[in-house]
């Protein structure tokens, strides 16, 4: 919303949007306050819609997650001119390509649109043969070969390229693409760093002249050049982690410290000092399917109130350099988009172990022993998992049915616990909490951020598919999680989860260690995890959890039983 637009206009548009006769408009408003309680079993239908309307909202939410809906986004690159830059045969000679080669780095290596998608790390759409959890609606794009998260968005007469939530929250699992799963190698940071390099070096006039950009495309590029000045980006410590926390904090530091984070060039030239300039706060993107059980958000539980989807859009656009008044106006005029995204995230389900491995590969007697150990030692933080094998009719169930979890009983109010894990991610929130709480849009919508001294012990639904473990990917497998910190692997290689025979340690549930890692992994030094680096520490879960008086609590056989149980969650 332009600064001159009266606030009551925005309020009227919000009232008009909320007065819609749609089922979403009639839905009960969820309790996003710090006093909110989650019912036993979670809140999969967070809006409490009738089942048919809920299904429609979830499907619409998937479309928004796959194709970014915010057309006032700060990061929109004119699409056809980009193709002209990349396609040497279309436009020869191309002086802009020569300029980009001179700039070097990742810019010089781009030769096709697929190279751009590789740079960002987006994954392919599911196969047409996939069904159920593994199938998603395909948004309408200008090209058929785009990947999950790639968004071609029309705005102000031009088609622009940006990337959606699925760029970080869709992952590959043994040949299947899973929406709502962590992308093991998100590289959106590279896209922003590329954009800064290019737009700072190539003016709108040169860009239009050598790419044959139309006037609307030239305006789109000019808007991008304006927005990108207010983006503070930095590369992650290692591939597989995301620096969104730093991007939001450093971007806020490049804006005026007022209620709308005014885009002021003074702060671009003189950004406020921020601990995230140097301190690491890297973490991996979260899975969506645990949201239904929680009442506080992010890995550290620092968002103590407010709709996490609404909050994420605001923060996302701060990190994209957008004008926040325009974003607030868009949110006021499109509440159904936030509702549909919210419905979809809270309805998300995890992949099951038996989708990829036979149920008979799990020793049920061993898994039941693991369940006892889990209830004794782990359930107080991670919740209780009611298994179908405990039902009165369990003898009538198939092997696969007996392994299912009937209900997850997590905390009514999400706790934050300090179990000794690496502190940098939690401490890093101090680099943006004050700036976020100062925003008028946060205050009007009950969004409150408070720095925490620990992390949320997450619900363990789908834990078998979430390796590597801990918020900073510092532990390669469940075997390593159950081992004292001092004896966990200090280094290991990370790789794609395409082949369950070579890319996965089925006994330990996670990455094969260095000696057994695929040779191709070892050639990519950017994916070599070294837990001795600041921010990548693998400590935690020792005394009082897996150690008693310095001695390991579990025998090797008990660890195997625990892992067998965790595979079934």
Image (spheres, rainbow, N blue to C red):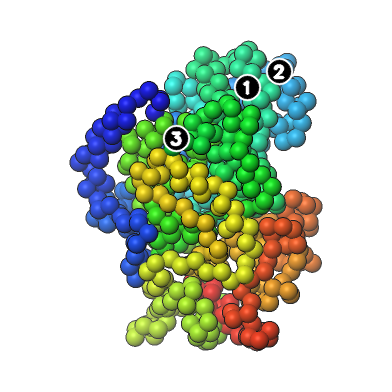
Q: Check the image and report above or below for 352 versus 332.
A: below
Q: How far apart are the two marked residues, 2 and 3, measured between alpha carbons?
A: 41 Å
104 on left or right of 181? right
Residue drawn at x 38%, y 45% as measured from the top left: 443
Residue 387 percent across, percent down from the top left: 42, 78
The residue carrying mark 3 is 260
Report if the CB atoms under discs 1 and 2 are less than 8 Å apart: yes
Residue sitting nearer the eye, 67 or 498: 67
Q: Position of residue 116 (x, y in %)?
A: 63, 35
Which residue appears at 39% of the width and 35% of the height?
A: 328
**Foreground: 551 or 463?**
551
Q: Are marks 2 and 3 in contact (CB under 8 Å)?
A: no
Which numbered mark, 2 or 3, is in the foreground of this view?
Answer: 3
Between the residue at mark 1 and the residue at mark 3, the CA separation in whole angstroms equals: 37 Å
Q: Earlier in the sequence, mark 1 or mark 2?
A: 1
Q: Which residue is mark 2?
A: 94
Residue at image coords 25%, 51%: 27
Classify mark 1: helix, strand or loop.
helix
Residue 31: horizontal and vertical position, in percent? 31, 57
- Who is closer to the viewer here, 334 or 11? 11
Pointer 2 local density, CA inside 10 Å: few below 14, some 14–19, many at least 20: some
The percent position of residue 355, horizontal first and vertical second, equals 51, 65
Please tell me which of labels 1 and 3 falls first in the chain: 1
The residue under label 1 is 84
Eyeballing the image, is 243 above or below 259? below
């Amino acid at each position: 919303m332009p600064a001159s637009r009266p606030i009551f206009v925005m309020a009227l548009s919000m009232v008009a949007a909320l007065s819609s006769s749609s089922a979403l408009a009639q839905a009960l408003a969820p309790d996003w306050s710090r006093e909110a309680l989650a019912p036993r079993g979670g809140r999969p239908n967070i809006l409490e819609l009738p089942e048919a309307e809920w299904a429609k909202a979830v499907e619409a939410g998937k479309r928004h997650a796959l194709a970014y809906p915010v057309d006032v986004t700060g990061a929109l690159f004119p699409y056809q001119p980009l193709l002209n830059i990349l396609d040497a045969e279309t436009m020869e000679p191309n002086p802009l390509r020569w300029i980009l080669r001179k700039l070097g780095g990742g810019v010089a290596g781009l030769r096709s649109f697929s190279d751009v998608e590789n740079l960002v790390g987006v994954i392919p759409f599911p196969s047409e043969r996939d069904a159920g959890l593994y199938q998603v609606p395909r948004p309408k794009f200008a090209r058929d070969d785009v990947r999950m998260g790639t968004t071609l968005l029309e705005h102000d007469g031009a088609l622009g390229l940006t990337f959606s939530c699925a760029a970080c929250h869709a992952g590959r699992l043994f040949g299947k693409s899973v929406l709502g799963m962590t992308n093991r190698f998100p590289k959106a940071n590279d896209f922003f760093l590329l954009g800064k390099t290019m737009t700072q070096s190539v003016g709108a006039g040169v860009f239009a002249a050598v790419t044959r950009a139309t006037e609307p495309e030239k305006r789109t590029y000019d808007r991008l050049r304006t927005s990108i000045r207010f983006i503070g980006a930095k590369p992650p410590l290692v591939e597989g982690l995301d620096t969104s926390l730093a991007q939001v904090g450093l971007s806020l530091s490049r804006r005026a410290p007022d209620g709308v984070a005014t885009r002021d060039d003074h702060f671009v030239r003189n950004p406020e000092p921020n601990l995230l300039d140097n301190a690491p706060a890297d973490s991996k993107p979260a899975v969506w399917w645990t949201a239904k059980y929680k009442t506080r958000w992010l890995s550290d539980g620092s968002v103590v109130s407010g709709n996490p989807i609404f909050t994420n859009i605001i923060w996302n656009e701060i990190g994209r350099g957008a004008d926040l008044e325009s974003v607030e106006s868009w949110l006021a005029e499109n509440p159904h988009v936030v509702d549909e995204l919210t419905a979809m995230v809270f309805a998300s389900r995890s992949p099951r172990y038996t989708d990829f491995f036979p149920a008979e590969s799990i020793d049920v007697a061993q898994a039941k022993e693991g369940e006892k150990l889990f209830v004794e030692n782990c359930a107080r933080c991670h919740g209780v998992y009611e298994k179908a094998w405990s039902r009165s009719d369990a003898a009538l169930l198939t092997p696969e049915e007996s392994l299912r979890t009937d209900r997850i009983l997590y905390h009514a109010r999400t706790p934050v616990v300090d179990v000794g894990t690496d502190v940098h991610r939690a401490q890093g929130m101090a680099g943006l909490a004050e700036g976020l709480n100062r925003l008028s849009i946060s205050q009007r919508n009950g969004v409150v951020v408070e720095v925490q001294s620990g992390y949320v012990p997450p619900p363990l639904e789908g834990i078998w598919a979430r390796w590597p473990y801990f918020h900073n990917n510092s532990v390669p497998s469940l075997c390593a999680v159950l081992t004292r910190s001092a004896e966990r692997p200090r280094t290991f290689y990370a790789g794609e989860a395409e082949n369950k025979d070579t890319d996965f340690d089925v006994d330990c549930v996670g990455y094969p260690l260095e000696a057994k890692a695929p040779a191709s992994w070892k050639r990519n030094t950017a994916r070599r995890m070294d837990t001795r680096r600041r921010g990548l520490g693998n400590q935690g879960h020792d005394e009082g959890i897996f150690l008693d008086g310095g001695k390991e609590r579990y025998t090797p056989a008990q660890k195997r039983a625990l892992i067998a149980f965790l595979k079934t969650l």
